[in-house]
Image (spheres, rainbow, N blue to C red):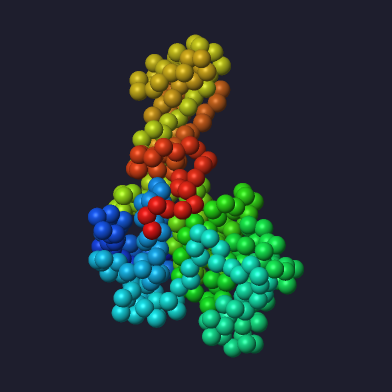
């Protein structure tokens, strides 16, 4: 996560606001009146099951499609009345790399510079700078068709940065990447926020990605925002955390079990699970009870709900830890 504290995030100007944002296709409601307040210089992650409306949200906020109802401001500009100003302030990296495979990396960047109406000299300077930043200098003259998936995603993001946007929409930017390439992208995203003060609006199919990167996370389900907060705040919404005590023998387990009436036993593992929020006060209280009763535990572990649990509970979706929560394409666009 970025280094911005909760206090500074609250004090920061807002990069994106939305009120009552709605979108329907015939009888199909894709977005049902969502509200957003995203401070500048932060990473905001939007999670949701397949077809929840994440990509639709990005498309509306990036002016690609219009909402049926609601209002929004991007970088202080009205989404409807100031479309040109909004587009000048944003960059969009979609689910699939928007690259010309017949051109080289340098040529793709120069093409984007021309589309941004940069002077030729400035375009070359910006292209060279971005190739260096994304470690693509050695591949600058190679056709994009020869690039790996990770290289393509880096170049795609570099092209988004040619116009120096202050707000970047990243719609599932690491879909299909191997773990090493995904972590490289994470470092790049962190750098954009920490070094450049860019605001990132991230949709992702990887729960770990949101946990690692986002200052705040919202969960979208059936077009509605069902929860929003920091990763830790969301985890605290979900029951199931506990402190697990391991004992050397059955007598130690039995002695501890008499001290904690709400605990559950795992007799085979000689372990005791005590319901807890995992906080330091709760941990200290458990240790004090053991010390006062002269009961010794061989090991102690704290288990708190993770974003997998949050996602499962809030959306009712089947999800296996470590896998994606969405397919690369959403049903609802």
How many marks can you see? Answer: 0
Q: Relative to the observer, which residue lies in front, 299 or 87?
A: 87
Relative to 304, does residue 33 appear above or below in the rendering?
A: below
Q: Which residue shows up at 31% across the image and 50% down it?
A: 222
Q: Which residue shows up at 50% across the image and 38% down it?
A: 321
Q: Is residue 89 visible?
A: yes
Q: Which residue shows up at 41% across the image and 26% down it?
A: 274
In x, y percent, where is residue 258?
39, 16
In x, y percent, where is residue 228?
35, 52
Task: Judge left or right: residue 290 versus residue 225.
Answer: right
Which quadrant: the C terminus?
bottom left
In x, y percent, where is residue 209?
51, 51
Q: Is residue 32 visible?
A: no
Task: Judge left or right: residue 284 versus residue 151.
Answer: left
Q: Relative to the observer, which residue lies in front, 326 or 188?
A: 326
In the displayed image of the protein, which residue is found farthest to the top?
A: 251
In x, y percent, where is residue 200?
47, 64
Q: Which residue shows up at 51% across the image and 11% down it?
A: 250
Relative to 88, does residue 229 appear above or below in the rendering?
A: above
Task: Judge left or right: residue 231 versus residue 208.
Answer: left
Q: Quadrant of residue 33?
A: bottom left
Relative to 193, does residue 219 appear above or below in the rendering?
A: above
Q: Relative to the observer, which residue lies in front, 23 or 46?
A: 23
């Amino acid at each position: 996560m970025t280094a911005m504290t909760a206090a500074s995030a609250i004090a920061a100007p807002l990069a994106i606001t939305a009120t009552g944002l709605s979108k329907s296709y015939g009888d199909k409601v894709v977005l049902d009146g969502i509200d957003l307040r995203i401070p500048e210089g932060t990473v905001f992650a939007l999670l949701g099951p397949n077809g929840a409306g994440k990509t639709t949200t990005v498309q509306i906020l990036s002016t690609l499609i219009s909402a049926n109802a609601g209002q929004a401001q991007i970088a202080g500009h009205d989404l409807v009345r100031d479309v040109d100003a909004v587009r000048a302030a944003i960059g969009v990296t979609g689910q699939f790399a928007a690259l010309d495979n017949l051109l080289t990396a340098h040529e793709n960047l120069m093409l984007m510079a021309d589309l941004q109406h940069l002077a030729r000299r400035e375009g070359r300077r910006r292209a060279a700078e971005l190739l260096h930043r994304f470690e693509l200098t050695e591949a600058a003259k190679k056709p994009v068709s020869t690039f790996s998936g990770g290289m393509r995603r880096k170049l795609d993001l570099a092209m988004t940065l040619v116009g120096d946007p202050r707000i970047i929409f990243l719609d599932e930017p690491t879909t299909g990447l191997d773990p090493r390439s995904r972590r490289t992208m994470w470092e790049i995203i962190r750098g954009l926020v920490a070094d450049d003060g860019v605001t990132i609006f991230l949709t992702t199919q990887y729960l770990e990605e949101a946990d690692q990167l986002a200052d705040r996370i919202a969960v979208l389900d059936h077009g509605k925002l069902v929860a929003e907060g920091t990763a830790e705040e969301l985890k605290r919404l979900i029951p199931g955390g506990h402190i697990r005590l391991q004992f050397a023998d059955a007598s130690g387990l039995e002695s501890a079990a008499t001290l904690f009436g709400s605990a559950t036993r795992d007799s085979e593992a000689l372990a005791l699970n005590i319901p807890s929020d995992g906080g330091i006060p709760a941990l200290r209280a458990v240790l004090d009870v053991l010390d006062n009763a002269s009961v010794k535990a061989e090991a102690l572990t704290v288990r708190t709900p993770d974003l997998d649990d949050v996602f499962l509970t809030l959306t009712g979706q089947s999800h296996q830890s470590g896998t994606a929560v969405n397919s690369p394409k959403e049903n609802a666009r």
